Image: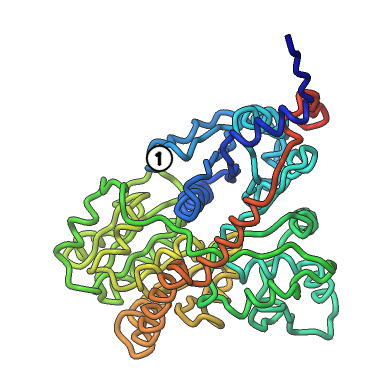
Amino acid sequence: MITLFISEKVVKTFILIIMKDTIVLYSAIGRGHIFSVVELGKLILTHNPSFSITILIPTPPNTATVDTTTFGCDSSITFRHITISPPPSGTSPFHLVRYGNHNLHQVLQSISKTTKIKAVVLDFMNYTANEVTTTLDIPTFYYYTSGAASLSVLLYYKTIIESKKREQCNYIEIPGFPRILKEELPSYPEELENIFLDLVATMSECNGIIINTFNALEGKTIKALQEGSCFPDESNPAPIFCIGPVMSLPGGEKDENGCLSWLESQPSQSVVLLSFGSLGRFSKTQLTEIAIGLEKSEQRFLWVVRSESDEDSLEDLLPEGFLDRTKEKGMVVRNWAPQVKVLSHDSVGGFVTHCGWNSVLEAIGEGVPMVAWPLYAEQHLNKIALVKEMKIVLALKETENGIVSATELGDRVKELMDSEKGREIRERVLKMKESSVEARSEGGSSYVELNRLIQLWKEKDHLSLLSPNTPLLSNFSG
């Protein structure tokens, strides 16, 4: 009788050979972030079907789990929910997932028992999860769900803070970003500025940054990022992979409010869509200005209304008689419309948008020109790049109290839909639509970059998670 003694290392190596390679994607909280991460997972599989994708979704206390069956994913994409322990009051959204790091650690160990984790891709909002992936020695990448322009500002933020303190300097020069006045940059509280600096330090040391953009749209900024100009303190900055546009295609959205049926009765490219994202809520005063402006513009419109109170009816929120006076030319719906399907409809010829990056890419993907009305987060930076560099939007001006007047909105909508400048913007957006398709087609810039990223993942092997002696991390909050 012959007894074979096989070392633990040999056993692990054999297990790795027969396991399927997995990429783990960790989404941030929020509909826009989750959808973008899901579409990224689908895109990865189109280039390498041999991978499996596991998408992690953070679930804070007293929050319903996301219904993942609505995403239309096949069996190569699986979902796991990461429970977030109750955080202290006032915790920043950037730090929220830290209170799920203990659970993240356990989930990654569980996944590694049946598959080879080639990399973890963190939504940039989840940067504190790096504390887990670094400890477990997993190759860690960041997915920046917005565009290259706002990322260049974020990465350069330490230098920007120093520049803003120099009184003799009116302008701020940021590599790859349009030259701007100091006051054009959004102001943030010191606590958030410190978070940005911490985030940048973490991102700079990761294995790579994936950006949802493409060369034809942001070539100047992408070049600055790839050359390392936006990493002033790094001699060897993280590599950049621009693989966009990553966006949802017209598909499973339900038309609960009858928007598409109404659009069928409208002339080609005659309707302007007004939609401001899930967080784009307005006061009654601002809603009144929008209504008056739309009526004065004499343009057809589809308006998705979100207000500060969900209890008020449209009749309570809008000027008396507005709905009756505009019923031949306009449709107003409460809270939601199937935006991707609406933008793809032949009747839609313009879009008043909050400049959320998903919405911008969806409009470009359908060749729809835009009016920019940024509201929060990086949207103001997106607007600057869209207006000054890409030249595919018209910009709205706010009054000193932050209100967009009826006259301003009406004039910009009319200009977009019925002027020579509006036609020029439409032509540029249509060309950008063609470029977006080319970027993701075989041989295109984003196609090449995604293949480069996948090849990098294929070359990486990861053994540490398979060790039965890897301890759970007791120092993580939650």
Taking the view exactly as shown, the residue that stands out farthest to the bottom is 420
Identify which residue is drawn at 60% across, 42% down. Answer: 24
Return the residue nearer the eye: 126 or 302.
126
Return the residue nearer the eye: 66 or 267.
66
Q: Where, by quadrant of the figure, is residue 393 drawn?
A: bottom left
Q: Specify whether residue 31 is in view.
A: no
Taking the view exactly as shown, the residue that stands out farthest to the top is 1
Taking the view exactly as shown, the residue that stands out farthest to the front is 1
Where residue 206 sits in the image (x, y, percent)?
A: 74, 54
* Residue picked out by circle 1: 74
Side of 171 relative to 125 (left or right): right
* Residue 256 vertical position relative to residue 434 in the rendered view, above or below: above
Where is the C terminus found, in terms of image quarters? Answer: top right
Side of 69 relative to 26 (left or right): left
Return the residue nearer the eye: 282 or 13.
13
Where is the N terminus found, in terms of image quarters? Answer: top right
The local crowd at label 1, few if under 14, some if 14 to 19, many if 20 or more residues have their Cα within 10 Å, is: few
Where residue 462 sits in the image (x, y, percent)?
A: 71, 41
Taking the view exactly as shown, the residue that stands out farthest to the left is 265
